[in-house]
Amino acid sequence: MTSRANNLKKSLQAVLATLAFSALATAPASANSRTVESAYGPVEISGQPGRVVTLYEGALDAALAVDANTVGAVITRGGSDVAGYIRAQAGDIAIVGAPAETNIEAVIAAQPDLILAAPRIDKQQVELLSRIAPVIASNVPMLQPDSWEQETRLFAKALGREDQAERVIIQVKDRIAEVAELVSAKIPDGQRDATLVRWMPQGPLVMAEGLFSASLLKAVGFELTDTTWSKRAAHTANP
């Protein structure tokens, strides 16, 4: 074990006793206990978690959409804060790392009672984080047109906010139908091609068509082009 890992472990041991006492003293009893299927097996959760940390942009989107009290998140890829489109909703949220590098001390400081994580989070990190709070790592297949919908339901179940999630999903689908109607009426059929690009520090990156934003473009009637590279990258990552 590296010195950094040892330091993280010591930090956990030093703080966990205090957190455990605090949780026992303040957590309300709840009969709403449920089993949530995570990427590394089932996780038992009771009640509505009051403090949530997200280690994944999709989890942050879902948590805020159902009005969960999200107290920590990772920065967006290529940025220094959460994504601009959601910054106002996130408010003064604590930054607890980057998509590929979680700051364990920052997670501890946020005092979460639930942690939502990405599909590819390392199993050893999940075991470490589980000593702080239950960890739900997405088990939803990536880059599918309905991945966003499945993940919203998964995280909402963990949050105890399934009804809110269903309302959000309906709102999104209703808005898709409205925009699709507008696109059909305003843009000729042969002019609905589009390329989705994200600007990274290294330059422009063509986004995979299975991502939520790309799925929305397709759903409202656009044909995505220049996705050959992203398809090859997705196949390499998911052989």
Image: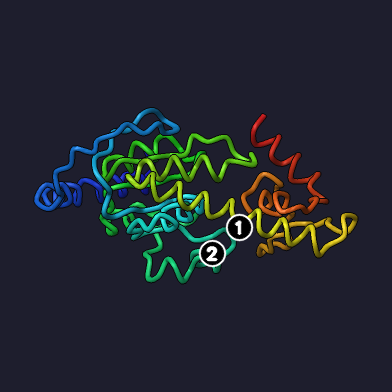
Residue drawn 18% across and 37% down?
Answer: 31
Q: Please count the marks in the image.
A: 2
Q: Is residue 12 left or right of residue 62?
A: left
Say above or below: 224 vs 182: above
Camera-nearest residue between 169 and 92: 169
Quadrant in the rendering for residue 143: top right
Residue drawn 82% across and 51% down?
Answer: 225
Camera-nearest residue between 173 and 215: 173
Say above or below: 85 vs 48: below
Quadrant in the rendering for residue 6: top left
Q: Amino acid at mark 1?
A: Arg
Q: Is residue 212 left or right of residue 151?
A: right
**What residue is shown with label 2?**
83
| Image location (x, y in percent) of residue 57 | 50, 54
**What residue is shown with label 1?**
175
| Image location (x, y in percent) of residue 108 | 28, 54
| Image location (x, y in percent) of residue 22 | 13, 52
Camera-nearest residue between 176 and 230: 176
**Quadrant into which the N terminus falls:** top left
Residue drawn 83% across and 56% down?
Answer: 193
